[in-house]
Amino acid sequence: MKIKIIKIISFVLIFFVLLYAVNNVLKFKYFYLFDSFYKLKNNSIDVLLLGSSHSYVNINSFYLYKLYGISSFNFGGSIQPLWNTYFYLKEALKKQKPKLIVLDALTTTLNDEYADYSGIIKNNYELKFSFDKINSIIISSPKNICIFFLNPLYQYHNRYSSLTFEDFLSYRGREKYKYYKGYVLFYRISSNTKPNVNYITNEISLYPKIEKYYRMVIELAKNNNIPILIVKSPYSLYNEYDQKKYNMAKKIAKEYNVPFINLNYNYDDYNLDFSKDFYDQSGHLNYKGAEKLAKYLGKYLKENYDLPDRRGDPKYYSWEMNAKYQDKEIYNFELTNLANLNEYIEKVKNADDYIIGITMLGNYQKNDNIIQNIASKFNINNIYLQNSSYVIDNNNLIYSSKGSSNYLFYKEIGNYTDLVVNNEKLSINRTNYIKSTNGINMVIYDKFTEEIVDNIYLEYDDNSINPTIKR
């Protein structure tokens, strides 16, 4: 009898271990919000940022740390209804006791009883299994289909056909997500029209379910003796209807003696440029706009709340690493958008952790101005300048060839990645990055992010090297 019981228990344990493993592989991979959150040390978040994408895009935890040393975390979801925000806050308070909660008020304007299919999944499935998660799913979905969302495998069991190798890796093989703090930075520029509805002072009632959970979020914060600040981040689609809703949200906040800051009242105070600082027409800031907002809002937070500067504190190593990864991403992005060759070379030279592979191929003359300029910038011995190849590591020339295939450079760089260079090959991980056999080819690899940053070439044209950067 005992052996039979042991067999049953063993079977059940093995079943659940396998189910857990299968679930981890098949589950939807978004931004690793909860993976990063659950790995944080208890009570390490000073500012908890809640809300929709207008919170995790516009009010950016990376910039708040970089500029002011504020250890914040964007704990929100896409078009997140306030009932999900409430359960996110409940989940956060199981591990964290922030010094301040900041809630973006965008979704106080919603008029929906339930979330759509995508919203139900994105705003519930990463929560750890608990009665709170079950309640959140039930409240999010219509009763007639609720059962289908309570079993996550039902939603993604057929993902097996689209699995990639990355699905089996922690953080899909990208180290930076280990330090992720919940924000998203956008880079594209979208021109918008500056709205002006500040003159509207009347109100519209919030949708009953929205108001109920808006109040519950505020009350949960106050019951835990945590200050809460309601903000409305910049919004390019701002209209009269929104203004009336936000007026009501502000009125409700006032009932609880909670400050409400509408950042759409004072664009000029933080120099927001509607022609350059937005990513899209939906009110999401790009990385430049997010930096401007963080400078302004972070200053307000430091002046009005007791928020330590955590920069340099070894206990906040994950914030330091997150900042370094994000700084790198921005630097690399800006490099790839440069068109001026001199500016490009200077930015490459000023970077840390770059490995640069260069090939110079074709019929050009060694005394060509562009050739000489590049040779000078990278301290290349000009006797090899024709049909030759070079490798520069952190501005140190570590390899040069004379144009013979007998000369070959090989270097391991990063996980499962190799750099191979000679006059016929500029290869990383068996992909050849030579685009011109009559000109200059250059590939930039970042050792820190373990990514290929850029691959440019300059062509020999009309008896000289054309300085126009091509990709």
Image (tube, helix red, strand yellow):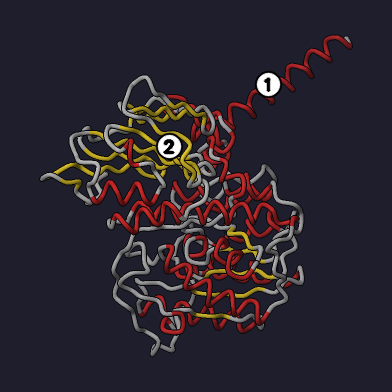
**Left or right of 464: which side holds 154?**
right
Q: Is residue 216 visible in this depiction of the protein?
A: no
Q: Residues within 10 Å of mark 1 (few under 14, many from 20)?
A: few
Instruction: Return the x and y of residue 380 as percentages of the image width and height.
Output: 39, 43
Q: Nearer the viewer, residue 346 or 366?
A: 366
CA–CA distance in space, label 1 to label 2: 52 Å
Coordinates of residue 275 in the picture (x, y in percent) = 30, 72
Residue 178 higher or lower than 403, as above or below: below
Residue 107 % position (x, y): 48, 66
Question: Quadrant location of residue 388?
Answer: top left
**Residue designated by label 1:** 15
Percent position of residue 429, x then y = 43, 27
What residue appears at the point 70 percent right and 61 percent down from the top-left corner? 312
Residue that badge 2 annotates: 391
Q: Residue furthest left?
A: 462
Task: State the image quarter where residue 258 is shown.
Answer: bottom right
Amino acid bearing label 2: Val
Please state, as top left, top right, bottom left or bottom right, where the N terminus lies in the image.
Answer: top right
Residue positioned most to the front: 383
Q: Which numbered mark, 1 or 2, is in the foreground of this view?
A: 2
| Quadrant for the C terminus in the image | top left
Instruction: Tell me the residue at 55%/28% (across/down).
Output: 168
Q: In which quarter of the image is residue 276?
A: bottom left
275, above or below 62, in the image: below
- Helix, strand or loop status at disc 1: helix
Q: In this view, does 380 lie above or below 54?
A: above
Q: Which residue is located at x 48 percent, y 56 percent?
A: 184
Residue type marked 1 = Phe
